[in-house]
Image: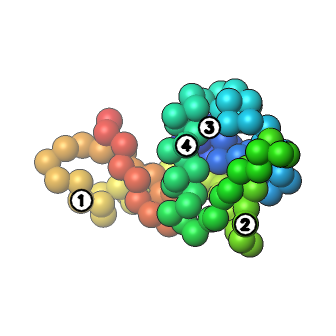
Amino acid sequence: MELRNEIYRLNKLHRLIKNKNTGTPQELAEKLRISKRHLYNVLDDLRMLGARIDYSRSKYTFYYSNHFELKLHLEVEYLDENEKKYISAGSFSFDALFVHGNILFLQK
């Protein structure tokens, strides 16, 4: 499941930044198995969530310059046929599942 991999990757990135153990941008991208460009996009996403992320050229690491915590996990609850009846998904047939209380629709 791609979502699970993305959550794992974000948690790993957060841990590496918090521990000031990322290495160079290229090394960090390799650790996360993503491109360097994708890494910078993810860092921008974290900044939009309030993280101040800087880079130390002398220590070769990204680090948080403010207190920032990131706690991500995934809970999935599948609905039975009776519960699905109460969800309107327009004119399409969808399976629905809850992710942290939000409804995520997956086309059948």
Of mark 3 and mark 4, the one earlier in the sequence is: 3
Foreground residue, 44 or 8?
44
Please identify the quadrant where the N terminus is shown: top right
Q: Amino acid at mark 1?
A: Ser
Label 2 vs 3, first from the N-terminus: 3
| Marks 4,1: beta carbons within 8 A | no
For image coordinates 75% across by 56% down, the residue present is 63
Q: Which residue shows up at 56% across the image and 61% down it?
A: 47
* Residue 5, numbered circle: 3
Name the residue type under label 3. Answer: Asn
Q: Nearer the viewer, mark 3 or mark 4?
A: 4
Task: Name the side, left or right, on which 24 lies relative to 7.
Answer: right
Q: Earlier in the sequence, mark 3 or mark 1?
A: 3
79 or 14, nearer to the observer? 14
Relative image position of residue 75 (x, y in whole percent): 61, 55
Q: Is residue 2 left or right of residue 28?
A: left
Name the amino acid, label 2: Ser
The tag earlier along the polypeptide, 4 or 2, is 4
**Crowding near the residue tagged with mark 3, few <14, some 14–19, many ≥20 C-alpha atoms within 10 Å:** few
Query: Which residue position holds label 2?
Result: 65
Find the distance from the CA under tag 4 to the CA under tag 1.
Answer: 38 Å
- Mark 2 lies on a secondary structure that is loop
Image location (x, y in percent) of residue 5:
62, 37
Q: Is residue 91 visible?
A: yes
4 or 1: tag closer to the N-terminus = 4
Crowding near pointer 4: few (<14 within 10 Å), some, many (20+)? Answer: few
Disc 3, disc 4: CB below 8 Å?
no
